[in-house]
């Protein structure tokens, strides 16, 4: 589990304490990194197979989701905010009303089905290209041309 609730702070919330307690059953198979400097995040992405963003916040655009996709990770997101539009059919969207159960089932499915995980990984990498700085500039230029 990479990161923390606040930038640069390793705040231990009651929720995080609960996660620590639950993770003890896994006998050190779950690692909590706490805050990770932005420059080091790609190292964690490349060690991973899946990027998970089970957000309840209606975030309009998630840089983390794009970073996961650009790193070639299969992506699991909630149906909050712009996530569904961002990832399209390149990842798995779990519903907030059944978030915990659906997230658990999806994680297990991707852990077992390596072919599906690889397929989603390739699709997400390809889709991330539409969010490149070059495409951003092209689309912005079109907006200015239409003004």
Image: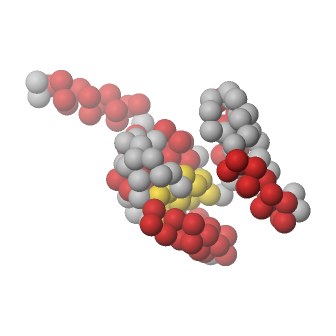
Q: Say which quarter of the image contains residue 103.
A: bottom right
Q: Say which quarter of the image contains residue 41.
A: top right
For residue 122, say whether it is visible: no
* Residue at 57% across, 72% down: 101
Q: Residue furthest right?
A: 27
* Residue at 64% across, 73% down: 108
User: In this figure, which colouring scheme has been used for the structure?
Assistant: secondary structure
* Residue at 56% across, 47% down: 68
Q: Position of residue 66 (x, y in %)?
A: 48, 44
Q: Position of residue 24 (x, y in %)?
A: 85, 60
Q: Position of residue 4 (x, y in %)?
A: 67, 39
Q: Say which quarter of the image contains residue 12.
A: top right
Horizontally, residue 139 falls left or right of residue 132, namely left
Q: Nearer the viewer, residue 24 or 70?
A: 24
For the C terminus, the quadrant is top left
Q: Position of residue 78 (x, y in %)?
A: 47, 58
* Residue at 41% across, 53% down: 80
Q: Residue furthest front?
A: 14
Q: Nearer the viewer, residue 33 or 91?
A: 33
For residue 8, say whether it is visible: yes
């Amino acid at each position: 589990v990479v990161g923390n609730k606040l930038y640069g702070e390793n705040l231990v919330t009651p929720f995080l304490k609960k996660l620590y307690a639950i993770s003890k059953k896994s006998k050190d198979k779950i690692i909590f990194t706490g805050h990770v400097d932005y420059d080091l995040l790609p190292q964690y992405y490349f060690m991973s197979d899946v990027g998970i963003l089970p957000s309840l916040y209606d975030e309009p655009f998630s840089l983390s989701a794009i970073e996961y996709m650009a790193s070639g990770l299969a992506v699991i997101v909630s149906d909050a905010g712009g996530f569904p539009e961002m990832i399209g059919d390149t990842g798995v969207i779990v519903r907030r009303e059944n978030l915990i159960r659906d997230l658990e089932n999806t994680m297990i499915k991707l852990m077992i089905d390596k072919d599906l995980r690889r397929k989603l990984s390739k699709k997400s990498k390809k889709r991330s290209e539409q969010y490149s700085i070059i495409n951003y500039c092209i689309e912005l230029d079109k907006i200015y041309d239409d003004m």
